[in-house]
Image (cartoon, rainbow, N blue to C red):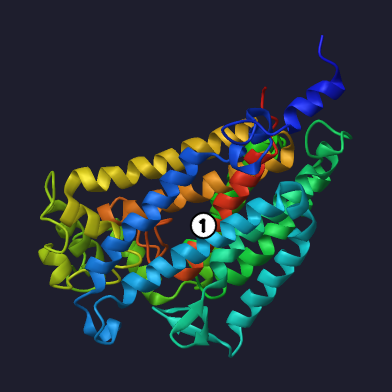
Amino acid sequence: MTSYGSYRQLRLAPQRGGVPKALAKDSPLWRIDWILLLAAAVLSLGSSLLVWSATRGRDSLTHGDPQYFLFRHLTNVMVGAVLCAVVIAIGSRRFRTVVPFLYAAVILLLMATLSPLGSTINGQHSWIQLGGGFSVQPAEFAKLAIVLSMALVMSDQVDAGEREFPANKAVFRALVWATLPMAIVMLMPDAGSVMVMAVIVLGILLASGAANRWVFGLILAGVGGCVAIWKLGVLSKYQIDRFAAFANPALDPSGVGYNTAQARIAIGSGGLTGKGLFHGTQTTGQFVPEQQTDFVFTVAGEELGFLGATAIIVLLGVVLWRGCRIARQATDLYGTIVAAGVVAWFAFQGFENIGMCLGIMPVAGIPLPFVSYGGSSMFSTWVAIGLLQAVQSQRPIAA
């Protein structure tokens, strides 16, 4: 029989060929979900070619440098990867302690957006210009704030062993925390981001074990809110036109329906294998607006064809699959809620973005996770990957 002391010496003793296997299992690298990380990395790095193809001929955007957006996109990916590594290093349990401060910082950024510091792009007053061609969109970080704040409030008593499911008071407090950033974003107005946030809240309620009346109540409140927003005229004219074009695809194809009409033409012309990277006529002819951001999926559909577009969907599916797996295997309710919130976020945002390119969803102006160009979106999605990995890392590993 081997004593604990001799076993400890065996674990710590240097072995030929490198670190002992038992010790390696204790390292954070052993606990990382490499499939999730690889899928997100392939999406982010591979999309740099799509962004490059969509922008290299647009001198008004690139300032005469065809590689302008390519290098900036790759820089965004690298910064996002660093943020992901930082979150993993902090760990899920220690990260909980800074959630209130992160939430407060996001609220201040959102309020600053509505002040003279904010700027309007494409009809939305949702940006803060930092100078040097850089800007930040706080609504992207608000999605993280909602996930983390709701997870913190709803899991407190459950993870302490005081309750089996979140109390009604905790659910109400969590909804209040989520409502504040959503209300500020709606004032911008950014209806697309608010839709994503609403789905995040719904996904969290379903995963948390909260009473069903909260889920039904949220759905009814969402329907009532949509009616109120429409009746009160909160939406701007261009947003109303987008919904009108969705309801009637043949409506004004040279006006309000132009974006979706050109997007469908681009994707439909790609066929099975596409026209070849950098050889898409719709892309090189600059017929599709905002093609490096909201409509980047049309580049894949036209130049890489059905197979290339399907590859993006499959990779996103892998991210969602691994996220669901992490939520199911989490050791506490906080981890389950965080993972479920991220999965709901990525699932709906990916479906909405691809759906609006195909004409089956209204144009909402939200990016395709990991694929669209944009620093705020890339940073927030990679922080979310870091959160998933942090939840995964606290799960005990069988010997």
Examine the rendering and report whether any part of residue 32 can be seen.
yes
Residue drawn where x is 64% and y is 66% of the image: 181
Q: How many marks?
A: 1
Q: Residue visible at 64% across and 76% down?
A: 109
Q: Amino acid at mark 1?
A: Thr
From the viewer's perspective, is 394 left or right of 54?
Answer: right
The quadrant of the image that shows the C terminus is top right
Q: Residue furthest top?
A: 1
* Percent coordinates x, y for residue 366 in the rendering: 42, 62
Residue drawn at (19%, 77%) of the image: 57
x, y percent for residue 365: 39, 66
Rendered position, 218 above or below 101: above
Q: Residue 370: horizontal and vertical position, in percent?
A: 42, 56
In the image, 357 versus 133, the foreground residue is: 133
Give the residue at x 33% y 74%.
Answer: 69
Q: Can you tell which quarter of the image residue 138 is in?
A: bottom right
Does residue 261 appear to the left or right of 9 in the view shown?
A: left
User: Disc 1 designates what residue?
Assistant: 381
